[in-house]
Amino acid sequence: ALLGMGASPHERTTAGNTPAHWAAWKGYASTVALLLAAGADVAALNAEDTTPLEDALSVSQVDCVRVMVCNGARLEDAHLQRTPPFLE
């Protein structure tokens, strides 16, 4: 609804998070899909140098990871401290 009213998928919080970072971390796969369709960048870095994909991987949000990979995100580009159990 907010995207339809002119909200930008590129807005950032003071920590550098985009709406895609937040939706991916929370596990809102349908919101991630909407944001990507509106032009959100799956490679956007926040202040901690993490991408939405890395945020989703860090908390095992499998559906969000799937949506992002199907929309161009590359698992090979994720910089992870450890491999999430669902990828082992």
Image (tube, rainbow, N blue to C red):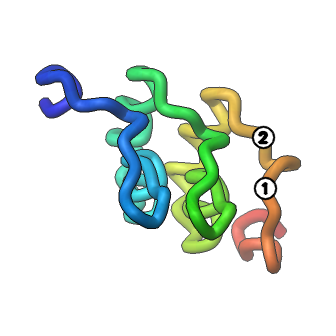
Displayed quadrant of residue 72: top right
**Which secondary structure lies at badge 1?**
loop
Mark 2 is on which residue type? Arg
What percent of the width, then of the height, locates residue 28? 36, 52
Determine whether, in the image, residue 85 is placed left or right of residue 61.
Answer: right
Q: Residue at x 56, y 52 (%)?
A: 52
Q: Which residue, given by chain and number where applicable, does mark 2 sit on?
A: 74
What percent of the width, then of the height, locates residue 83? 81, 73
Displayed quadrant of residue 84: bottom right
Rounded to the nearest angstrom, the CA distance separating label 2 from label 1 is 7 Å
The quarter of the picture where the C terminus appears is: bottom right
Q: Residue furthest right?
A: 76
**Residue nearest the observer in this picture, 4 or 66:** 4
Q: Is residue 21 above or below residue 32?
A: below
**Residue nearest the observer in this picture, 2 or 57:** 2
Q: Residue at x 60, y 39 (%)?
A: 42
Displayed quadrant of residue 9: top left
Q: Which residue, given by chain and number where applicable, does mark 1 sit on?
A: 78
Residues at marks 2 and 1 touching, judged by CB atoms closer than 8 Å: yes
**Which secondary structure lies at badge 2?**
loop
Q: Residue furthest front?
A: 14
Q: Residues within 10 Å of mark 1 (few under 14, many from 20)?
A: some
Q: Residue at x 70, y 37 (%)?
A: 73
The quarter of the picture where the N terminus appears is: top left
Q: Is residue 24 above or below residue 85?
A: above
**Residue nearest the observer in this picture, 23 or 18:** 18
Q: Is residue 82 above or below residue 77?
A: below
What percent of the width, then of the height, locates residue 55? 58, 63
What percent of the width, then of the height, locates residue 62? 57, 57
Q: Residue at x 60, y 44 (%)?
A: 44
Mark 1 is on which residue type? Ala
